[in-house]
Image (tube, rainbow, N blue to C red):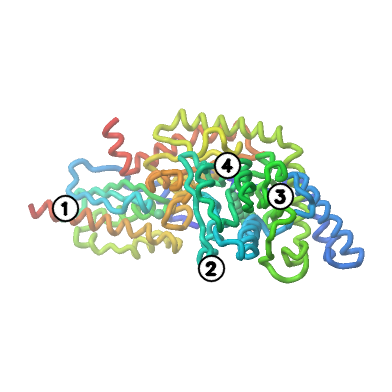
Amino acid sequence: MYSDKVMDHFSCPRNVGEIENADGVGEVGNAHCGDIMKIYLKIEEDVITDVKFKTFGCGAAIATSSIATDMIKGKTVEEALKITNKAVVEALDGLPAQKIHCSVLAEEAVKAAIEDYQKKKAQ
Amino acid sequence: MNVSKRIYLDHAATTYTSKEVLNEMLPFFTEYFGNPSSVHQYGREVKKSIDLARDRVAKAIGALPEEIYFTAGGSEADNLAIKGVAYANKSKGNHIITTKIEHPAVIHTCEQLEKEGFEVTYLNVDQYGMVSLEDVKSSIKANTILISVMYANNEIGTIQPITEIAQIAKEKGIYFHTDAVQAIGSVRINVKEQNIDMLSMAAHKFYGPKGVGALYVRKGVKLISIIHGGSQERKRRAGTENVPGIVGMGKAIELAYQNFDEHNSRVKGLRDKLIKGVMENIPYTRLNGHPEKRLVNNSNFCFEYIEGESLLLNLDMKGIAGSSGSACSSGSLEPSHVLLAIGLSHEIAHGSLRLSLGEVNTEEDIDFVLQVLPEIVDRLRQMSPLYEKVKGGK
Ligand SMILES: Cc1ncc(COP(=O)(O)O)c(C=O)c1O
Ligand SMILES: [Zn+2]
């Protein structure tokens, strides 16, 4: 049911872990619906220099977390904010229709983490 | 991926058709292909084989042959029992009692009847998935026409006090149906001694073919047909018979009870070893279902802080086939209704794993599962944001 790309990211997820004293942290989803993603960003001069994630969720949730973190690494905050769920799914060579809702999490988590960064910066 | 061996631990989903059963079926595709309703020899010889299959099914559960109605599987048997009795006894009442942990074939049938004006009580179960006899008694009303309680649960394996519930129903003059799809072959059943009025079966759960099942209906039960057409199955189930399937089901059920003690004690030994190994080696784990009153081939666990589908995918990469009640593995947004009914939170219910054993499993299979499962669970926990908090406190 999953593409080879999804299975690759699921079985060897990139960027798993935490960043201590991260510049931005975002957590979205809830255990009720079955998927939670937490993302940590290291940001220097508005460029994402490192990113890590932790995900509680299905194959699609883990694979999208993995590829989305790969996609924003090295990007500016502004570029990262433009990441869409659609782009993430395309990068994975598609997802089964009933799994699209699991992939929305990655986009939301990136945005939440950047928001957190911007809030901290404004303080 | 390098999978040298595949280990099938999803026998509750379905079994393969055994060689003996298949061999019995094969001539009915080519050689004995007649329509059992036909008058000529082709028809008559096939009719005889259906009669034999009917005898075998009846004998396995202590019924009379004329009380067995072949269907296209467990779902149809459940539909026939519940709708058939509901429609036929509308003038007596419109209230049905069932449980919150039934298979969708029962629950969705009852929900459909609710839309049609019937009233349904869905009984709660305790933490082990057991129905209380007190609840059964107190939910009976003057207009109750049917009680339907599954023999054994397909997810957590809990076996209900069927004899006692049937007794209550009998005393009140209410029909009693049980979905025994998971119980056949794992539990000894005698419908007469146990006062069961209707009982559903499906061949593919006991090494028979898919798409064939049967409903036992005690003589005298008022039930109407739900599939209309020809007069097959004494007018209670129209349609030219699935002859190879019916022949296969007869053979499969006969074998299941011939090898009953040997098969079940072996499977139980392996299952107990699996449960013990998992519970001892993986922290934050719970066993779902009743510790003793459960199907001998069933094990069902919840691993806290991880999600079931990713667990299944990881096991599959190691060649191990299991199943889960997580929302994401079922394609719905809700985790298993059974796990919620035994009181688990959504979060914990998402991390469930059912491993159901069968004839093909060996000690080595269980050793292999016990070797790889703790690593997989740990790896997923290390990735889980929910586990961080626990680790911090450790
Ligand atoms: C308890 C129970 N009832 C009914 C069914 C439905 O049987 P079938 O798939 O043969 O229609 C199943 C099979 O999954 C089951 O486990
Ligand atoms: Zn998901």
Q: Position of residue B369 (x, y in %)?
A: 53, 35
Q: Which residue is mark 3?
A: B208
Residue at 51% x, 67% y is B115
- Say what amino acid the circle numbered 1 marks: Tyr
The amino acid at mark 2 is Glu
Disc 4 from disc 3: Cα separation: 25 Å
Element carrying mark 4: loop
- The reply to whether residue B225 is in sight is yes
Give B318 or B82, whichever is nearer the viewer: B82
Tag of residue A117? 1
**Does residue A81 lie above or below A61 as drawn?**
below
User: Which circle's residue, 2 or 4, is located before the other in the chain?
Assistant: 2
Q: Residue B326 at what x, y percent from top left?
A: 45, 49
Q: Are marks 3 and 2 in contact (CB under 8 Å)?
A: no
Q: Which residue is mark 4?
A: B160
* Residue found farthest to the right: B41
Foreground residue among A63 and B298: B298
| Disc 4: CA contacts within 10 A as few (<14), some (14-19) or many (>=20) | many
Q: Nearer the viewer, mark 2 or mark 4?
A: 2
